Image (spheres, rainbow, N blue to C red):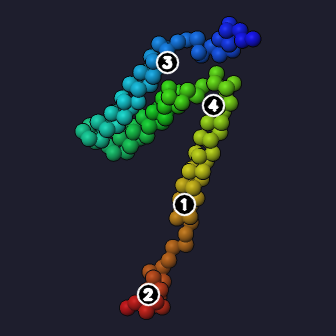
Amino acid sequence: MSNPSHHTAAHPEHTQGSAHNSRHFWIGSILAIVLTAVPFWLVMTGVLRDMQTTAILIFALALIQIVVHVVFFLHLDTRSEGGWTLLAFLFTAVIVVLTIGGSIWVMYHLNANMMPMPADGVAQMHDMSGNH
């Protein structure tokens, strides 16, 4: 009927025990707390005088925290479901990055490529609208 050795061989992640899962959870939790506390500390203390450097560092720590959450809490890796969950996640991430990046690119170029209006054109617009 059901062979227990066959069941554990098919699912090796279940044979590692709860000690591994507990340790994995605690490592992820500690990393998540640190990656949340460091940006908070950077902003509240103003330790870095340059706002751009602070923003870049916070953004980098946020990206690292995304990876920590995906690996430690969502358990997405190359072993789960033959790597298909990781592949689906990466595909979704690429689509999101392309959508956001493309939107920012279009908005920047729309602003940069608008025809400048001469100063007398603004006055003519106000005259035409009846605002004096």
Q: Which residue is mark 2?
A: 126
Gap between marks 4 and 3 measured at Cα: 19 Å
Residue type for callout 1: Met
| Cβ–Cβ under 8 Å for marks 4 and 1 | no
Gap between marks 2 and 3 measured at Cα: 69 Å
| As drawn, 24 above or below 94 | above
Q: Which residue is mark 3?
A: 21
Residue type for callout 3: Asn
In this view, the residue farthest toward the front is 1
The residue that appears at 48% across and 79% down in the rendered structure is 118
Horizontal and vertical percent for residue 105? 57, 55
- Judge the density around disc 3: few (<14), some (14-19), many (≥20) Cα neighbours within 10 Å: some
| As drawn, 61 above or below 127 | above
Gap between marks 1 and 2 measured at Cα: 27 Å
The residue that appears at 26% across and 41% down in the rendered structure is 44
Gap between marks 4 and 1 measured at Cα: 31 Å
Residue type for callout 2: His
| Cβ–Cβ under 8 Å for marks 1 and 3 | no
**Disc 4 versus disc 2: nearer the observer:** 4
The residue that appears at 56% across and 51% down in the rendered structure is 100
Point out the tag, 4 or 2, that comes first from the N-terminus.
4
Q: Which residue is mark 4?
A: 86
Point out the tag, 1 or 3, that comes first from the N-terminus.
3
Q: Which residue is mark 1?
A: 107
Q: Name which quarter of the figure residue 76 lies in.
A: top right
Q: Quadrant of the C terminus?
A: bottom left
Exactly how many numbered labels are in the figure? 4
- Judge the density around disc 4: few (<14), some (14-19), many (≥20) Cα neighbours within 10 Å: some
| Cβ–Cβ under 8 Å for marks 4 and 2 | no
Q: Secondary structure at mark 3?
A: helix
Gap between marks 1 and 3 measured at Cα: 45 Å
Q: Name which quarter of the figure residue 34 lies in.
A: top left
